[in-house]
Image (cartoon, grey):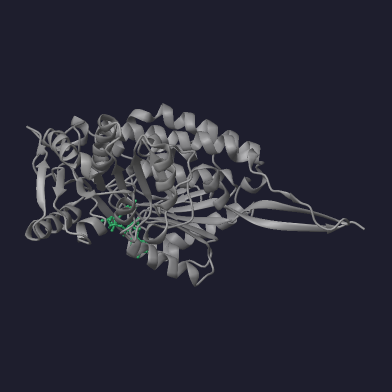
Amino acid sequence: MPVLPEMPRREALIGGEWVATCETLPVEAPARGEAITRIARGQAEEVDAAVRAAGDAMAGRLGEWSRWSARRRGEWLLAFAATIEADHARLAALECADTGKPLTQARGDISACARYFRFYGGAADKLHGETIPFETDFAVMTWREPHGVCAQIIPWNYPAQIFGRCVAAALAAGNTVVLKPAEEACLSVLRLAELATQAGLPAGVLNVVPGLGREAGAALAAHAGIDHLSFTGSPETGTRVNQAAAANHVPVTLELGGKSPQLVFADADLEAALAAVVRGIIQNAGQTCSAGSRLLVEDACYDAVVARLSERFAALRCDAGERDADCGPLINARQREMLESRLAAARDDGIRVAAAGQLADGAPAGGHFVAPQLLVDIPEGHEVIREELFGPVLAVQRFADEDAAVRLANATDFGLCAGVWTRDGGRQLRLAKRIRSGQVFVNNYGAAGGVELPFGGVGRSGHGREKGFEGLRSYTRLKTLAIRHG
Ligand code: NAD
């Protein structure tokens, strides 16, 4: 067992106090399949108290948040970004142990979390309404007001990053937050919440209730006291929380994953493309909503691409996060078993594994490792090119021309991201217009996670946008003021 970082608190954060719950839940380290600590098991009662505390903070009944100007909120967020950076080593160690991801990736996630607080800290006092030319005896303007109490339900794959993405934007816009992190991994979130209270955030502005999805999560989504819901996770749970929120007429942002294609044309810089293709699928062991899990290759370079990718896949190694290999374990036994059974079914259907990585020498026993795999010879419409597998598995298909490439790219209900690799400028724009997805990257994939870039999907990938200014706007509602001045 490696030396573990000091664990964060086991309670829920409600109204500025750390509150013990009747029961707790074990937290497993995915690299070893062993429990490393316990977290609170919040239930409807704790969720209700947290929503009331967030409502009181919003209304000025608990602390002074409602009197903080936009500039003061921004200054707090900027200072908090520095607090995160000062605690970087401990936060990264927690993220690495808890999610199993390689330490370098965990470090990058903590830096990204700090970047969200810095970006939204700078943006807080730059969120303007408009003036609207109307009849000559009117002055018309719009105000951007906070929704109020923002409920945020987040997943286990990027706890710290998604905390930054959702919490920083909501607070910058003047909201208060009740956050339900995932039961599988939330240690960095609990540490971030600890740091936020120490950094002087008024009581009730940020509340964190760990617990099970079907208990704390369901209670939060259905609570009549929330004014906005942001959910990141699976499409099935997304539908459920959307329905629960609709009963209370609560606006919802859904970020539900994808089956994102990377398209490689023969005129592309293949070296750059293939490096990005591999990174795009093994990052966080493929457990990334924006993973580039499908590769579409033009006939003219198909054999060369598969041969060169096979070499790269065969060289990949899986290991515990702190040993910082190419790929960590999957989050738990359930995810590993689900992926293994889908891979077995794919082999039964004649799909070929062109190459696979391996477990590193000395990797710990008991970890939920699945070696990266390159799948080829895939029949059209097969599950491995339609469904999110959430593992380090790349499905390769070939195409003859642009029309065929677009047809394959759009042959899924998801639409989150796409990568296009070609030197032809006209083709870059034609494809960017025709591919159905929220983000398109040309000659790169993911733009290094840019916090400034609006992010979200179409179809089964969800709706609404997080990140960038668009994300900040989604944490506000517009009020129109029309003054007749005679
Ligand atoms: P999930 O959607 O069930 O969990 C995400 C969050 O929702 C967690 O905080 C969970 O506690 C909460 N939740 C679960 N049930 C709930 C309910 N009934 N009401 C309210 N909240 C609830 O996802 P999962 O079970 O952890 O993973 C299943 C699949 O989802 C994965 O295989 C993967 O395909 C997908 N997934 C996608 C993302 C993403 O970033 N898009 C993240 C995690 C999982």
Residue placed at 30% from the left, 37% from the top? Answer: 94
Q: Is residue 370 above or below residue 178?
A: above
**Residue 271 appears left or right of 245:** left
- x, y percentage for residue 332? 20, 51
Quadrant in the rendering for residue 266 = top left
Q: Residue furthest bottom?
A: 247
Q: Is residue 1 visible?
A: no
- How many numbered marks have been drawn onto this rendered protein structure? 0
The N terminus, quarter of image? top left
Residue placed at 65% from the left, 52% from the top? Answer: 145
Quadrant in the rendering for residue 95 = top left
- x, y percentage for residue 56? 59, 56
Residue placed at 41% from the left, 52% from the top? Answer: 434
Q: Is residue 422 visible?
A: yes
Q: Is residue 243 above or below residue 325?
A: below
Residue placed at 59% from the left, 56% from the top? Answer: 147
- x, y percentage for residue 234? 33, 58
Q: Is residue 267 above or below residue 21?
A: above
- x, y percentage for residue 103? 26, 32
Foreground pick, 78 / 26? 78
**Residue 431 appears left or right of 124:** left
Give the quadrant of ligand 1: bottom left
Foreground pick, 170 / 402? 402
The C terminus, quarter of image? bottom right
Q: Is residue 268 above or below residue 471?
A: above
